[in-house]
Amino acid sequence: MRRTAIRRGGAHGGSGALYGAPQATTRSGVRYTLVAASVCAITSTALAGVTTTGQLLPQLPDGSNYFANGLLVVGDDQAGQLTASAGGAVHAAGVTLGRQPTGDGDVLLTGAGTTFDTWGDLIVGDAGHGRLRVYSNARVNTAPGADLIVAAQPGSAGQLDVTGGAR
């Protein structure tokens, strides 16, 4: 099993929340798992795909796959949302949700075969608010050495919610 470091806040820390039972080890020795034992009651008949609303950088068209060759920012200084479901895929060099203090980034991943891959850090709430929801057997994959950072800066907020066999 590949382990990803989970950091809550930077040197001064913002507010963060992790939902799930303890399991994966962080650099500070705290253990978390990103796989909850409960079954999620979300069902979907949607076709495989990725949809976006609001602010995403870079802005790419909706479709079954979303590929950002560089940093993907969901909610830079405004609200932005990305939803991948039913086998949709997102690939990015790094991901930041809620980059600036007024930014609000929300990512929802749901359904078997849905993947969210990053080969850089995944920041949920940099200076703004970030929310990452992973449901119903969706997967988040990070490269070795990449960090999952929740509420990176003072005044920021990050929420990570993983349920229903997701990982």
Image (spheres, grey):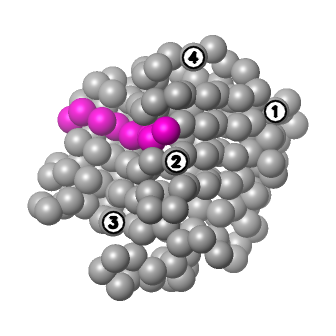
The residues bearing labels 2 and 4 have C-alpha atoms spaced at a distance of 19 Å
> Could you say whether the residue bearing mark 2 is in a helix, strand or loop?
loop
In the image, residue 24 above or below residue 126: below
Check disc 4 and report the residue beneath it: 60
Check disc 2 and report the residue beneath it: 119
The residues bearing labels 3 and 1 have C-alpha atoms spaced at a distance of 32 Å
Residue located 54% across and 28% down the image: 68
> Could you say whether the residue bearing mark 1 is in a helix, strand or loop?
loop
Which numbered disc, 3 or 1, marks the residue that appears first in the sequence? 3
Between circles 4 and 1, the one closer to the viewer is 4
The residues bearing labels 3 and 2 have C-alpha atoms spaced at a distance of 17 Å
Residue located 80% across and 48% down the image: 113
* Mark 2 surroundings: few (<14), some (14-19) or many (≥20) residues within 10 A: some
Kindly indicate the quadrant of the structure image that contains residue 137: bottom right
Residue 2 position, x and y percent, is 60, 71
Asked if the residue under mark 1 is in contact with the one under mark 3, i.e. CB atoms within 8 Å, the reply is no
Which numbered disc, 4 or 3, marks the residue that appears first in the sequence? 3
Q: Is residue 53 magenta?
A: no
* Mark 4 surroundings: few (<14), some (14-19) or many (≥20) residues within 10 A: few
Residue 8 position, x and y percent, is 30, 65
Asked if the residue under mark 1 is in contact with the one under mark 4, i.e. CB atoms within 8 Å, the reply is no
The residues bearing labels 2 and 1 have C-alpha atoms spaced at a distance of 23 Å
Q: Is residue 156 left or right of residue 112?
A: left
Q: Residue furthest left?
A: 12
Which numbered disc, 2 or 1, marks the residue that appears first in the sequence? 1
Check disc 1 and report the residue beneath it: 48
Q: Which residues fall within the magenta stretch?
A: 93-101
> Could you say whether the residue bearing mark 4 is in a helix, strand or loop?
loop
Which numbered disc, 4 or 1, marks the residue that appears first in the sequence? 1
Check disc 3 and report the residue beneath it: 7
